[in-house]
Each structure stands twice: as structure tokens, then as C-alpha cells.
Amino acid sequence: MKRRKFIKNSITGAAAIGFPLILNANIKGSNDRVRVAVVGIRGQGQSHIQNYSALNNVEVAAICDVDENLYPKIIKKHFTDKGLKRPKTYVDMRKLFEDKSIDAVSVVTPNHWHALASIWAIQAGKHVSVEKPCCYNIYEGQKLIEAAKKYSVIVQDGAEQRNNPCAQTAAEFLHTGQLGEVYLAKGICYKWRDTIGSYPDGPMPEGQKHPFGSFTKKYLSKVNYDLWLGPAPKRSFNPNRFHYNWHWNTEYGNGDMGNQGVHELDIARWGLDVSLPTRITAMGGHLMFDDAQNTPNNLMALFEFPNAAGKGDKKKILQFEVRHWISNREVRLGDDNSDASGYMKSATNTIGNLFYGSKGYMAKNVDKWQTYMGKERELGSSGSGLANNYKNFIDAIRANDPSMLNAKIQEGVNSCTVMHLGNIAYQLERSLEFDPATMKFKNDEEANLMISRKEYRQPFIIPDSV
């Protein structure tokens, strides 16, 4: 479509539905460069930098992190050593969002920043890809959906497996009844994770090392820890409240169900073809170690979904389990450990899904699925294949078409909501009833208070009106 005609039609369509239209002048056509900024560059952020830089006519034009110690090595490794232009650098993401030359933002911060950073970027007219889990709590997910609907930008969830032919063909096989009535799905996250230990607040002594940095007074002089805390309560610096180990602190992370596990929750929910559960129960604990972790390293959660088309009790069940130590394999999951990164496969980890239907069962990992049919569990249909979620995001931006996204933000929020419901049931140590229509727990004010933070720290507040 000609650019002028496309803009005219877009303006007419946006006005008709009452959404404000934000046209980014830097995206002029399919042959123009897309300028991306990556917010959060220590861990997974480097994967974002590397993958965007590999795409045709895409430039990682800016990077942002509260830890300025990271810049020299990362710029050398991912830019100057490869002959790429040095990116602009920012410490405060708000300054980055004011940069009108930036078209799109990848949010790769700790979980407690995901929704707020995304909403701010969306309000600034940037296209957004936000890492999983896209929201730290249920309330933030609803506000993220509101922002995505209100502004005419592309918003991608970090559920990268939804781009893979493996997951797409598995879902199609299940949804078309080829496994019969699919009544149970399992999400499995068995990852070897050692103790995180305990450390006093404040800088570390010279010569002492933490697994993720020295964190001496000199190191921390280049860290804006107040910005790192953002919407979370004011706390003194602690090594276990910073790089990576924040995952295991409930003020910033959601445990492994919200880290690796949310990928498998998403696939389980997709394969079951359900949205949100009505009953939730969970049991687990932080076992074996006396350390600073306050999220469970063993967790078993059950979710019940209505199934009007089903037989018997007309329900579907999703079972999710985290284990953090020595564990068994589950039905061929982990037989192929060819992913050297260990992200989705490794010699010690077992990660994936099982689906049970009236005709057989399916075992699925990140890039392969196999069915076992009938009472004799004979080999049945199978599928495989990986794809590029970064390219899917850029393609949707160039086409200005959110329907092209495979990992849509609504689906990401739904899967995160399931994860949050499981964590709330675990924390309250009781079964819960949830009403998806109202997004509230039934007759349980204590649980409803956990839908959001008790308090957001100024000025890092999720806006009531986005």
C-alpha cells in the first residue's frame, strides 16, 4: 500500500474507534531502518542486542542500564568489535523514551520494572517488546493491556515459543482433536539451582566476590540503585537484591514459575485452549538451603478451567511444577540436550510440557514434540522447528500490523495471570476461587489485596489511567 494512502486510512480507522494515533516518523516504509533501544543489558539483554543486530536494516541505536560498569565490555563485544556504530547510552529510561529517533524498545529489566517501563515507552509512541513475565502482578498486566489498546503501537510479549513451528503445530494438533479430548496439561521446570547464600547489606569488601560481580564501593559508584529499585520499596543495596538473584526475592521477582516456568505455563494454557482458571491451589516451599531466597524452590500448582464442551465434569486441569535440585526426567523430555546454552535444554535441566488426551499423550520441549497413541503408546504424529521472535516483532512494526504478532500481549498477560494466581495460592497456603469476568477472587479480600502492590514508590507508579 502506498505510504500516503496507508497513513490516510490509518488516521480514519483510529479516529473511528477513538484511539489516539501516534505515527513514528522514523518508520517510512519496509525498506527503512528500524532503530531499536534495549533497556537492561546484563543478561538476556545481550541476546536482544545480538539478535536485533543480525536482522536486515535494524540498528540497536541505544542501550540503557542502571549499571554503567557494563557498558565498556558490552559495547566492545556487540558493537565496535563487529564494526557496528556505537549506541547511545542511557541510565534513566525516561530520558531514552524522550529520544524521538528511537522507533522501538526491548524491555529486558527485572520483573518489577516490566509493565511500568513498557507503559512509559508505549505512551512515548515507541513499539515495545517486553520480556516474560510481562507484568510483576495481576493489576500491572491489566494496565499494560489498556495501554497497548489505547496507543497505536506494536506490543509484543516475551513468550518466544509462540513463534516456533514446533509450538504452533503442537497447538494445532491438540486443538483439532487429534489427541482426543485434551483434559490435562503439565508444565515442567526442573532446573539445577544452587543456594544463593546470604550477604550483609552494603558494598562488599575489596577482594570478595559475588557470583555476579564484585559490588565493591568503587563498583557501586557507577550503579544507580534507586533507579534499579524503581516501584519497589526503598531498600539498602544487597548483592542478592541485584544482578540475577533478584529472581528469588518476591519484591522484584516471581520465583521460577515466573522466570523459566512462565514459558511452560503459556504453552500448557495454549495447548489446553483455555484462558483463565476458576480454581487454584498450590503447595511447596524453599527447601534444603538456609539463605536469602524467599521464593519457593519446589512448587506444585494446580489450575482448574471450565470446559463446557467436555464430557464428565466439564473441566480441564493444568498442573505446573518447579524443582531446583536433583530430579528425574519426565517422559522423554530432556532426551535431546543439544542446546549448548542450557536455556531450554541441558544435561541437568528438564523443561517442557506434557499433554494428555483421550487418544494418547504428547511430550513437547522447545523444538520438538512427539505423540504416543493408544493403550500401547505407539509412536504417533510429531513436529519440530524454531523461529525468530525478534524478526516477527520487526516485521509487525514495518507492516504496522499488530495482528502479525505471534506472541500477543493479551495472551502474555493471561499466562502471567495464571502464574500470579499460583504464587498467591502458595503464599496464602489455601485453595482460591477466581472470577475471570471481574478479575477478582471470590469472597477473599486477603487474596484480592495481593492483586497489586500495597504501595508503589514515587515517582515509579503504574498510572490508574494510561
Image (cartoon, rainbow, N blue to C red):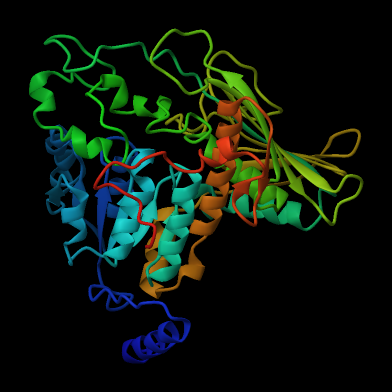
Asked if one can make out residue 264 in the rendered structure from this viewpoint, the answer is no
Figure disc tally: 0
Q: Who's the residue at 67% across and 44% down the image?
A: 442
Could you say which is closer to the camera, residue 66 or residue 432? 432
Place residue 249 in its image quadrant: top left
Specify the quadrant that holds the N terminus. bottom left
Q: Is residue 269 above or below residue 301?
A: below
State the image coordinates of residue 80 (x, y, percent, origin top left).
13, 46
State the image coordinates of residue 321 (x, y, percent, origin top left).
63, 28
State the image coordinates of residue 415 (x, y, percent, origin top left).
57, 47
Horizontally, residue 221 falls left or right of residue 351, namely: left
Could you say which is closer to the camera, residue 298 or residue 27? 298
Horizontally, residue 299 falls left or right of residue 274, namely: left
Specify the quadrant that holds the C terminus. bottom left
Q: Who's the residue at 38% across and 72% down the image?
A: 152
State the image coordinates of residue 159 (x, y, percent, origin top left).
50, 48
Could you say which is closer to the camera, residue 322 or residue 275? 275
Asked if one can make out residue 249 in the rendered structure from this viewpoint, the answer is yes
Q: Is residue 174 above or below residue 287?
A: below
Q: Who's the residue at 23% across and 73% down the image?
A: 26
Horizontally, residue 424 falls left or right of residue 379, namely: left
Horizontally, residue 384 falls left or right of residue 129, namely: right
Could you say which is closer to the camera, residue 116 or residue 325? 116
